Image: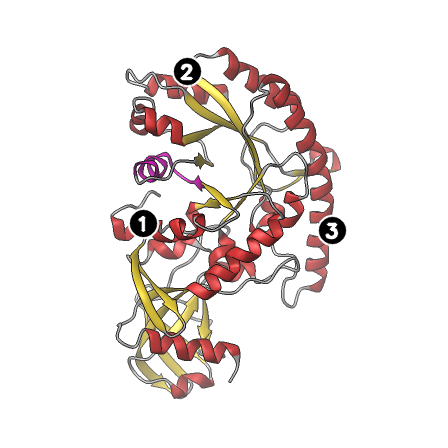
């Protein structure tokens, strides 16, 4: 029996009393992935990206482990909710235009102490002040550095379009603006190198493309390490009490951690290991989060139909954004239909061994987005469900 076949057998046993659709997290794989992140971070703390987890119980589980400290959140509303839930070190990784939430943040000492917000434009400071509605608490702020690689004199850009702040002078100038403006305190710098951390460099069946990605990433790592060090020095000259410099992501933990200028690593997808993270030479994770759909039809030889399953991930549309049929091995989508909103036909010889009511296990393309489809995660240890915990959605929250 292969490892995957053994996993299918124990997942089926663990959830035999549960009807699909359902989602699970394999705790042994989750914990092993956490250990691997810590190993690669080489002593630097890992701030957990909540958008990649979206489950308070699992955030608590990983933050209880040595090597993890703090949360990287994705909306201000989520940040305030987490702070009220007892989390006390939350970095909002994206700018916000939530007036009501800023009014709450600036009116509550506990929230203002626990939450750091992202800025990359003086207009955002004006927005926050206009939203205070009488709130006088000092707002902790973090600057974001544009990490993109510019080639051919800037005519070619590789990397996400995020912050407009690229040069040391630009970040230092905004740091000075913050220092002069009452009601704000600069505490950190963040730089997420998504073109390194979030792009696999070993694409199956694409050796030339894989080689090009590795060359690009090697050049991007060198350029960013040099520029990030200069940026940090420039900002520390204005704000010597800077508390943290956050960088990295699941795919670049070890290389980002090696930079002296970086004090902590941001990562989250490496806990669940969705299938977009299969194509890396730098690490091998274990799939920890899966969902199951029930067989509801047997249209013919070599075909079964499961309920639902059309859960595409965000990003540029393409086949790589679709969930993949994982267990039993050997199933594939019908190219004419793909995964559907209500039903999904699956082709392959394993279909002939499946009965109505059997479970087919899938892996999502991205990590936390799976939790937007399910109200609960069943936590599996061995071949037993040891607990069932709510996702954000299960607690009544869909922040985006």
Q: Tell me: 134 left or right of 29.
A: left
| SS type, badge 2 | loop
In the figure, residue 355 lies in which quadrant?
bottom left
Tell me the magenta residue range: 71-84
Above or below 286: residue 67: above
| Rendered image: mark on residue 392 | 1
Secondary-structure class at tag 1: loop
**3D distance between C-alphas at marks 1 and 3:** 39 Å
What residue is disc 3 on? 215
Task: Where is residue 164? Give x, y as percent.
Answer: 57, 28
Q: Between disc 2 and disc 3, whose residue precedes?
A: 2
Mark 2 or mark 1, which is nearer the start of the sequence? 2
Mark 1 neighbour density, 10 Å: few (under 14) some (14–19) many (20 or more): many
In x, y percent, where is residue 98?
Answer: 34, 30
Residue 112, picture quadrant: top left
Look at the magenta stretch and give its main secondary structure: helix
What percent of the width, then of the height, locates residue 31? 48, 60
* Residue at 42% from the left image edge and 40% from the top image edge: 73
Relative placement, left or right, of 27 versus 278 is: left
Asked which secondary structure carries label 3, the reply is: helix
Q: Is residue 114 magenta?
A: no
Closer to the camera in the image, 382 or 122: 382
Which residue is at a point 36% across and 77% down the rendered structure image? 12
User: In the rendered view of the protein, which quadrant contains the C terminus?
Assistant: top left
x, y (%) of residue 100? 29, 27
Between disc 2 and disc 3, the foreground one is 2
Question: Which residue matches tag 2?
Answer: 183
The residue located at (35%, 17%) in the rendering is 130
First in sequence, mark 1 or 3: give its number.
Answer: 3
């Amino acid at each position: 029996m292969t490892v995957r076949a053994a996993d299918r057998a124990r997942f089926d046993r663990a959830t035999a009393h549960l009807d699909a659709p359902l989602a699970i997290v394999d705790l042994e794989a989750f914990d092993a992935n956490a250990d691997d992140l810590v190993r690669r971070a080489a002593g630097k703390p890992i701030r957990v990206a909540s958008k990649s987890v979206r489950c308070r119980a699992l955030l608590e589980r990983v933050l209880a482990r040595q090597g993890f400290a703090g949360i990287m959140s994705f909306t201000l509303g989520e940040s305030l909710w987490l702070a009220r839930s007892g989390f006390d070190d939350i970095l909002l990784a994206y700018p916000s235009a939530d007036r009501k939430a800023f009014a709450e943040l600036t009116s509550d000492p506990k929230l203002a102490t626990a939450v750091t917000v992202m800025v990359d434009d003086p207009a955002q400071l004006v927005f926050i002040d206009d939203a205070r509605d009488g709130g006088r608490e000092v707002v902790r702020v973090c600057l974001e550095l544009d990490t993109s690689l510019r080639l051919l004199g800037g005519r070619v850009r590789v990397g996400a379009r995020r912050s407009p702040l690229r040069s040391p002078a630009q970040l230092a100038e905004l740091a000075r603006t913050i220092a002069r403006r009452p009601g704000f305190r600069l505490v950190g710098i963040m730089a997420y190198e998504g073109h390194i951390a979030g792009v696999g460099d070993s694409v199956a069946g694409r050796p030339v493309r894989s080689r090009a990605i590795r060359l690009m990433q090697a050049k991007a790592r060198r350029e960013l390490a040099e520029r990030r060090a200069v940026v940090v020095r420039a900002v520390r000259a204005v704000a010597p009490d800077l508390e943290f410099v956050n960088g990295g992501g699941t795919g670049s933990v070890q290389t980002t951690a090696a930079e002296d200028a970086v004090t902590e690593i941001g990562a989250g997808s490496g806990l669940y290991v969705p299938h977009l993270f299969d194509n890396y030479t730098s690490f091998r994770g274990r799939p920890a989060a899966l969902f199951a759909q029930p067989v509801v039809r047997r249209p013919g030889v070599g075909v079964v139909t499961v309920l639902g399953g059309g859960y595409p991930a965000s990003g540029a549309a393409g086949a790589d954004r679709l969930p993949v049929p994982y267990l039993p091995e050997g199933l594939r989508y019908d190219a004419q239909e793909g995964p559907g909103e209500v039903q999904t036909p699956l082709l392959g010889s394993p279909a002939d061994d499946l009965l109505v009511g059997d479970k087919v296990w899938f892996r999502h393309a991205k990590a936390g987005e799976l939790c937007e489809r399910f109200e609960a995660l069943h936590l599996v240890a061995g071949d037993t469900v040891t607990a069932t915990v709510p996702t954000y959605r299960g607690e009544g929250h869909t922040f985006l």
